[in-house]
Image: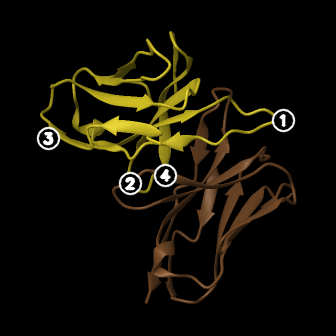
Chain colours: A brown, B yellow
Amino acid sequence: SQELEQSPQSLIVQEGKNLTINCTSSKTLYGLYWYKQKYGEGLIFLMMLQKGGEEKSHEKITAKLDEKKQQSSLHITASQPSHAGIYLCGARGGSQGNLIFGKGTKLSVKP
Amino acid sequence: NAGVTQTPKFRILKIGQSMTLQCTQDMNHNYMYWYRQDPGMGLKLIYYSVGAGITDKGEVPNGYNVSRSTTEDFPLRLELAAPSQTSVYFCASSLTRDSRLGNQPQHFGDGTRLSIL
């Protein structure tokens, strides 16, 4: 079965610094989703990447998909306290159409 | 837009009690899913549904039941609560299953935090 491994598990950065979160799949990726979760809340959809080499940006968050490496990266530029939370990557893991998820990366941004 | 709504947000049950976690969506999505999230373990699929009247087991279905009588609602039932079912439960929906021509993101509710004591 497919597994997604995220790194790092947790990250503490100073406000204004850039950071990158990686998501590596054990199998070929046919689409990759990034979600953000805050404590007590659900998962907020950030971005969906469908093709190798695809790159998407939303405000200060950029995600890329490297199909050959079976990997996606999420990059935050000039981090802010509002970026704090748990970032999860998800990919279609089976015929049910459900997502399988990485275990998440916990991001803290120090003001 | 309400999106995916889950109730209750919090619940404490005693071992052996039963309860139903409610999930409703107003986006006319065909696909609905129930996941549980345990600390450090990511999300695991419990049950899913591809449309009204159709449900199927996911990765961890034991101890749970579901029904899908309407497109909007997908309740999850715990019949005999056990401590191992202490978790955060998320309901999600999507318009269609992925295809090469059009992947669809899943939309999640805010979760139900359930403790079994």
Q: Are marks 3 and 4 on the same chain?
A: no
Q: Is residue B33 above or below residue B10?
A: above
Dot 2: chain letter: A
Residue A87, horizontal then vertical, whole percent: 54, 62
**Left/right of residue A40 with respect to residue A12 in the rendered view:** left
Residue A43 is labelled as: 4
Marks 1 and 4 close (CB-CB < 8 Å): no
Dot 1: chain letter: B
Callout 2: helix, strand or loop? loop
**Residue density around tag 3, few if under 14, some if 14–19, many if 20 or more, within 10 Å:** few
Q: Which residue is mark 2?
A: A41
Dot 3: chain letter: B
Mark with earlier residue (3, 1): 1
Residue type highlighted by circle 3: Leu
Q: Residue at x 43, y 42 (%)?
A: B109
Residue B117 is labelled as: 3
Q: Can residue B59 be seen at all in this image of the molecule? A: no
- The answer to which image quadrant residue A74 occupies is bottom right
